[in-house]
Amino acid sequence: MKLDIRESFQTIVANLNIKNENESQIISISYIATTPEEATKVVNTVIKVMEAEVGVLLEGDTIKTLSKATVEEAAIPVSPNIKMSLLMGLFIGLVGGLIIMVVILFSNNTIRENEDIEEITNIPILGEIEKW
């Protein structure tokens, strides 16, 4: 069987997920792709290859496909999740801004009041010059 997609074998294997459902004889196959059509094509091809190979490997035993992969019209993409990305960006921006503000506030060592000079030098202030 040949797939007419541009992905390499390693990429297909990395994006393919085959798992056994609840320790039963049912196998669930899923694939992460850029389009639902591509995912459907890959999963259905894997099913066809498995049906052909299991008959050879198990000497005549066959497997039965419960349902083929189909493209749903209202399919929700797994990623990117725009709402989650926006919320995470907002949260990280607010927390990052607060952290930067606190660091700047506590690292500010300018002298603003007479008491600041008294704290640094431990000498009382005798007089001060007012602003004009």
Image: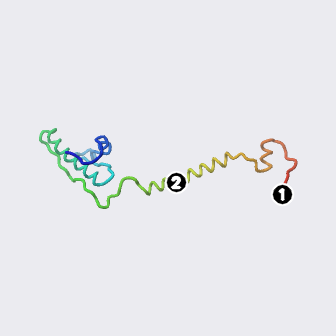
Marks 1 and 2: in contact by CB < 8 Å?
Answer: no
* 104 in relation to 82, above or below: above
- The disc, 2 or 1, on the residue closer to the chain's N-terminal end is 2
Disc ID at residue 91: 2
Q: Nearer the viewer, residue 86 or 65?
A: 86
Query: How busy is the neighbourhood of tag 2: few (under 14 within 10 Å), some, or many (20 plus)?
Result: few
Determine whether, in the image, residue 34 is placed left or right of residue 68: right
Pinpoint residue 21: horizontal percent, then vertical percent.
Answer: 27, 47
- In this view, the residue farthest toward the left is 60
Q: Amino acid at mark 1?
A: Trp
Disc ID at residue 36: none
Q: Residue at x 80, y 49 (%)?
A: 114
Colour style of the rendered protein structure: rainbow
Q: Nearer the viewer, residue 98 or 25?
A: 98
Q: Nearer the viewer, residue 9 or 72?
A: 9
In this view, the mark in front (2 or 1): 1
Residue under pointer 1: 132
